[in-house]
Amino acid sequence: MIVKKTQHMPEESDKVRVLQRKLYVAAKKEPKRIFGILYDKLHRMDVLIRAWNDVRQKKGSAGIDKVTIQEVERQGVLELLFEIQSELIEERYRPPAVRRVLIPKPGKNGAKRPLGIPTVKDRIVQTATKLVIEPLFEASFLDCSFGFRPKKNPHQAHAQVQRFVIGGYREVVDVDLKSYFTMIPHERLMLCVKKRVRDPKVLRLIKRWLKAGILDDGQYVRTVEGVPQGGPLSPLLSNIYLHVIDKVWTEKYPETTLVRYADDLRLLCKRQSKEYMEKLSSLLNWHGLKINQEKSQAVHARDGFDFLGQHFRLKPSRKWKGWQFCYRWPSKKAMNSIKEKIRNAIGYDDIYSLEDKIGVVNPIIRGWCQYHHYSNAAKHFHVIDSYVYTKFVGFMRRKHRWRGSGYRKAPRSFFEKLGLYHLHGKIRRWPLKATV
């Protein structure tokens, strides 16, 4: 008898981790090995349960079938997993088209980014495929890549850039790829996948995902190139394709340093940055990718540059006279973005209680702090604390019809006693030293 599960399912993660570890070790031991039998691992129940738990944890909206995660839990998770397992074993599974949604780009004055939302069922199958093939490619990925990888994060990418600028790589090429996810050539991408995976069933499944198409306002759009953003497998496929760029560049120009987070690249060198920018542009063009010339530029670190929401600038060290240090803090875009989120969260109404408003704002500030606390952002944190305080005083003044500014009636300590999260004292340091 099958018991319906409405909550978190036992994921048997130990078995899946053992499988991933074996695949990783085998791929690491033999860098040129091509794995031919993988499909049988996709439909293992422990892999499918782990895939379901990952999909459930990340939440997400429904695909074109309008089936949500909550509805899957009501109808029975095991039934769906057994159905997926049966379709995969009998090779009957066919990926449906993804549902296109447009989300606003931060600070882009109304510009929107297209996302492709697969169905919950399809997200489970994609995640299962990712769990099996990702260790094979992780064994080959270089240390210069930080985006959407296990045990990698933006903090490490920030520290890498800072470390090399301090070490003398003062000229920086700020590279912006033009519509990267929508321009990846399918045939070349599949050739990159075949360097590690040769199982025809897995390759056929990946190719079907690439060709599944998009449903946009009820109209089917055929996909001839690109990887739709929004699917669990898309970040891995994008890293697989850009790994070729990483490898070719680092082998050909070892005197430079490439730092990449998904499609966001920074090239650091000691001299001739404009020449390296032209060479990188030629390499990307040869692989079917283009640099956005309007947003890409070669700059010196003392003039400052942005990377992953932080601004980097080479300045005289405050501790050691005559030395140069690379300081970093939240970029202007990051500052404007958090202010906008706080402003929208507090709003201009006087309906909800102050405690409710604080409960909405706290996670926003705390998450922003976790991202930027490894930086030289003490002044910026003070600015945001003051901004939050000012907005809450304005809320209290509207709600209670206070006369005057309201700052005497509601000092900072008043909000702190109610649990308002503040950024003061939250800065953390990476163990970096300045160099000449």
Image (cartoon, helix red, strand yellow):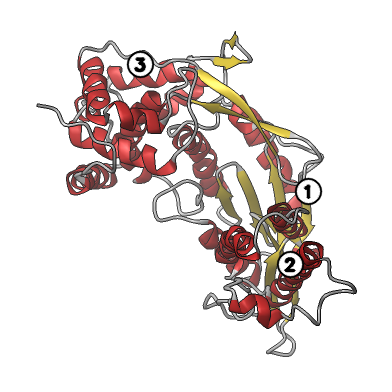
Secondary structure state at the residue bearing disc 2: helix
Furthest residue toward right: 404
Asked whether the beta carbons under mark 2 and mark 3 sit within 8 Å of each other, the answer is no
Furthest residue toward left: 1
Q: In this view, does 419 lie above or below 317?
A: above
Give the residue pinned by disc 1: 297
Q: Which is more N-terminal, label 1 or label 3?
A: 3
- The amino acid type, in three-letter code, at marker 3 is Arg
Using the image, tell me which numbered label, if any, was put on residue 27.
none
Closer to the camera in the image, 414 or 390: 414
Horizontal and vertical percent position of residue 270:
69, 62
- The amino acid type, in three-letter code, at marker 2 is Phe
Horizontal and vertical percent position of residue 419:
57, 73
Horizontal and vertical percent position of residue 340:
74, 53
The residue carrying pointer 1 sits among few (fewer than 14), some (14 to 19) or many (20 or more) residues within 10 Å by Cα, namely some
Disc 1 versus disc 2: nearer the observer: 2
Asked whether the beta carbons under mark 3 and mark 1 sit within 8 Å of each other, the answer is no
- The amino acid type, in three-letter code, at marker 1 is Gln
Q: In this view, does 227 lie above or below 200?
A: below
Gap between marks 1 and 2, in whole Å? 40 Å
Residue pictured at 60% horizontal, 57% vertical:
360
Give the residue pinned by disc 3: 204
Using the image, tell me which numbered label, if any, was put on residue 392.
2
